[in-house]
Amino acid sequence: MAEPDSWDDDAPQITPPTHPQSRLNANAPSFSFNPNAVSFNPSAPVFTPSCISSQSVGLNNQSPAPPPPETIVIESPDPISIVSADVSPQEGSAEPMVDDKQDNHSPFEASRTDPTDPVSDSLSSLSVHDTSDKKDYPMEDVEEDEEDTLSHLNVVFIGHVDAGKSTIGGQVLFLTGQVDERSIQKYEREAKEKNRDSWYMAYIMDTNEEERAKGKTVEVGRGHFETSKRRFTILDAPGHKNYVPNMISGASQADIGVLVISARKGEFETGFERGGQTREHAQLAKTLGVSKLLVVVNKMDEPSVNWSKERFDEIEKKLNPFLRSCGYNVKKDVIFLPISGLHGINMKEKVSKSVCPWWDGPTFFQALDEVQVPPRDPAAPFRMPIIDKYRDMGTVVMGKIESGTVRRGDSLMVMPNKAQVKVISILRDADEVRTAKPGENLRIKISGVEEEDILAGFVLCSIEKPIAAVREFDAQLQILELLDHKAIFTAGYKAVLHVHSVVEECEIIELLQQIDPKTKKVAKKKPLFVKSGAVVVVRIQVVDIICVERFDDFAQLGRFTLRDEGKTVAIGKVTNLVLD
């Protein structure tokens, strides 16, 4: 018995047509999957859209009345409903329903749009309606970052070795919730195993095993925390004299300096006497652009001190004249406050009157929030000295924006090799952002240059106004204290130049002018040599081309230090560039 064409007993038997389109066509277009199509069900009747009336097909007297309209909804991320469809048998067509989005040049186009075929004409009017309220927006608008209402500051912890810089940094992160209690307990166990019970807070910042074993910071540690008013980046600089170059690298990125002083008997004196790192760090901080200084007198809970006001006043009285000689206005730019970094006293919460009845000043966190720093210009030409780089699915550079603004998709230039690059992504702390302004410490992924073609000291800058790349420049120097066996500063003197993230060997090729430190007047006679304490204008030549700016144009990229045999011998500022 032959199988019927329809499983509906009431449906008329329809003989399939024998025209050529009913046969296999080897040249037919390939099948295109339609996710909105109704799934095939062999037991269901043939569907005919409601827009095709029974009169247009000519089945008024041949088919029963159609059932009520049926709505088919297909769930998807964007809800789409199909228009109502009347169920009705279809006469004389074995041709499947074709997606109206197919290529208009299909070989079957003529047969599907034949104006004489009422069914084809009705099918051409079938449409799918999108019921969602979605609009098309540019990707930049959809991914717009929330407005960052918190200003950002970089804080460098400086001071003599063992003053408690890493301990204070770790305590700050713990008090702001950046480190959990379980990690603190782990660090306490590790410190006890090394018989260094009081070092456990420093382990938060000193992640290197060598640093933990010796109790000395080597690399600049980093941490991030927030208060209700600001976002901060901690830069924990090493205090040992052997690692001063690393300290310079950290201080060159800072806006605020925290000079940590140990109140313990003998420790303050060791750091402040000639050759101590308290003096050199304070001097370097001012030279490197740290305009505001918080002097925290640490270890005030030490039994030999016991929150003594006399000891606090003694330290303040000795430090004030020295800080004034470094260029600080001690009334406006310097704040003294007593704390205990190990136990977090007077850091987040004010010290109790029963512990320290004489202190009425701010806490450490309050002082950080209240410090005023010079305004930055986000509209200036973009400048970001590169302090480090690595490869991570592309080239990533790290640094602090000194001026200007960077956005994802910007075209920039890497100097001095003049490589044009495109900004792929911007990472601030662990978050990806679309825009970053001056003062931010960032990791920027760029394309257009290989990681091995970038060195620390290169500068990422705007294409329209790139930074100058020179081999010679004029500078005004203040000679601090020359070495005993090199007591004369003259042409031919060689030293190591530190300017922003550049460390380069240099040579003094000419002394141009000598300036009286008191009257600021220029001497008429050109000097042949100078000694410690002199102020002189010189011409400096470096081995390789470096990126610098005039101090008057970009102060942070125009100030530098000269070091010789591990000692800072001079500080200076760039006054003129000698361009090739």
Image (spheres, rainbow, N blue to C red):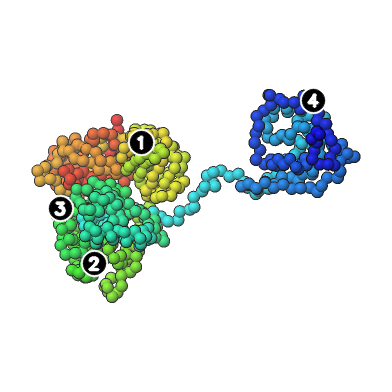
Instruction: Give the total number of marks visible in the rendering.
Output: 4
- Which label sits in the foreground, 1 or 4? 4
Q: Position of residue 195 (x, y in %)?
A: 21, 60
Closer to the camera, 377 or 89? 89
Q: Residue furthest left?
A: 485
Q: Position of residue 22 (x, y in %)?
A: 76, 27
Question: Counting residues from the N terminus, which is met first, the one under dot 1 or under dot 2?
Answer: 2
Instruction: Mark yes or no: residue 6 visible.
Output: yes
The residue tagged 1 is 451
Question: Counting residues from the N terminus, which is met first, the one under dot 1 or under dot 4?
Answer: 4
Amino acid type indicated by mark 1: Glu
Question: Counting residues from the N terminus, which is met first, the one under dot 3 or under dot 1?
Answer: 3
Residue drawn at point x = 68 percent, y = 24 percent = 27
Residue drawn at point x = 15 percent, y = 48 percent = 481
351 relative to 71, above or below: below
- Which label sits in the foreground, 3 or 1? 1
Which numbered tag is attached to residue 300? Answer: 2
User: Alpha-carbon distance for marks 4 and 3?
Assistant: 105 Å
Amino acid type indicated by mark 3: Gly
* Residues at circles 4 and 3 in contact by the CB criterion of under 8 Å: no
Amino acid type indicated by mark 2: Met
- Which label sits in the foreground, 2 or 3? 2
Q: Position of residue 444 (x, y in %)?
A: 40, 42
User: Alpha-carbon distance for marks 4 and 2?
Assistant: 103 Å
Helix, strand or loop status at disc 2: loop
Question: Counting residues from the N terminus, which is met first, the one under dot 2 or under dot 3?
Answer: 3
Amino acid type indicated by mark 4: His
User: Alpha-carbon distance for marks 1 and 2?
Assistant: 48 Å
Which numbered tag is attached to residue 275? Answer: 3
Using a 10 Å C-alpha cutoff, classify the residue at mark 1 as few (fewer than 14 neighbours), some (14 to 19) or many (20 or more): some
The residue tagged 4 is 19
User: Alpha-carbon distance for marks 2 and 3?
Assistant: 24 Å
